[in-house]
Image: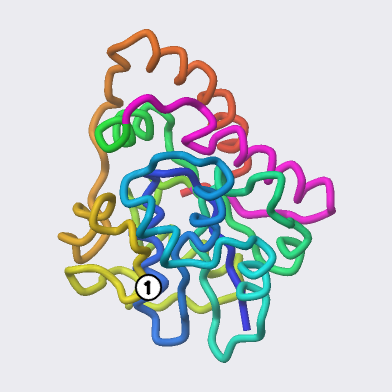
Amino acid sequence: MTTIAMWSGPRNLSTALMYSFGNRADFTVVDEPFYAHYLRETGLAHPMREGVLASQPQDAEAVVQSLTQPKKQHFYQKHMCQHMLPSVPRGWMLTVQNVFLIRHPARVIASFGAKYEGFGLADIGFSQQLELFEMLRAEGKNPIVIDSADIRNAPEHMLTKLCTVLGLPFDTAMLHWPKGGHASDGAWAPHWYNAVHASTGFAGPEGPLPDMETPEQQQLLAKALPVYKALSTCKLTP
């Protein structure tokens, strides 16, 4: 059985991709299993904080145990890179297939800012994404990188390529999912997942990059863009 750990930041096509794999009959999925631990440790006042804390184990070791138990089906784990605090064990990452889902930071900043105010680089996962990628490389692993824009431009083509490098057959069920969400959605879904709940498949290509209208957005873009560019050099090509 294949276990996939998909690493991204927020507002990065990550939920749609979870739905894509979750629509396969041979996969089970889990949605951001370290979120409650992250909120407990950081004290951040995220939307629906209390509901998240109540919905998941808050102990990182317990989460790792749930992620590494043998499964009857292939297992897809949707992770946020910023959730991987120093208190979270990482050795288990060496036992799974790691994929890094990237998106241009201008789009992430604009989309995240519409849902959450007063955030910085640590909240959108770029530096943590590069840190995790480099850790795996240092351990002799060869993690996969895929760009959300490439998936939106050509879903079947890019998902076929992704499945091939994962050693899986492509399944056309990955191209569509039922409207209204997935049974594995996290407790935070009502705040964050409105658009994907209204969808039945991947949205088409995006338009021009959004403008960074404030000095804070511009500074954040300047910090995140080098990470995106570095990871882009390793991505699956269309």
Report the residue at 24% width, 68% height from top.
181
Q: Quick one: which residue is furthest to the top in this view?
A: 215
Q: Residues within 10 Å of mark 1 (few under 14, many from 20)?
A: some
Q: Quadrant of residue 185?
A: bottom left
Secondary structure under the numbered disc 1 in the rendered image? loop
Is 145 included in the stretch rendered in magenta? yes
Residue at numbered disc 1:
184
x and y, in percent, of residue 120 in the image: 47, 25
Q: Quadrant of residue 103?
A: top left
x and y, in percent, of residue 159 in the image: 43, 63
Q: Is residue 153 among the parts visible in the rendering?
A: yes
47 and 209: which one is in front? Answer: 47
Question: From the viewer's perspective, is 60 left or right of 111?
Answer: right
Residue range highlighted in magenta: 117-146
Question: From the viewer's perspective, is 39 left or right of 48?
Answer: right
Amino acid identity at mark 1: Ser
x and y, in percent, of residue 100 in the image: 56, 50
124 and 2: which one is in front? Answer: 124
Quarter the N terminus occupies:
bottom right
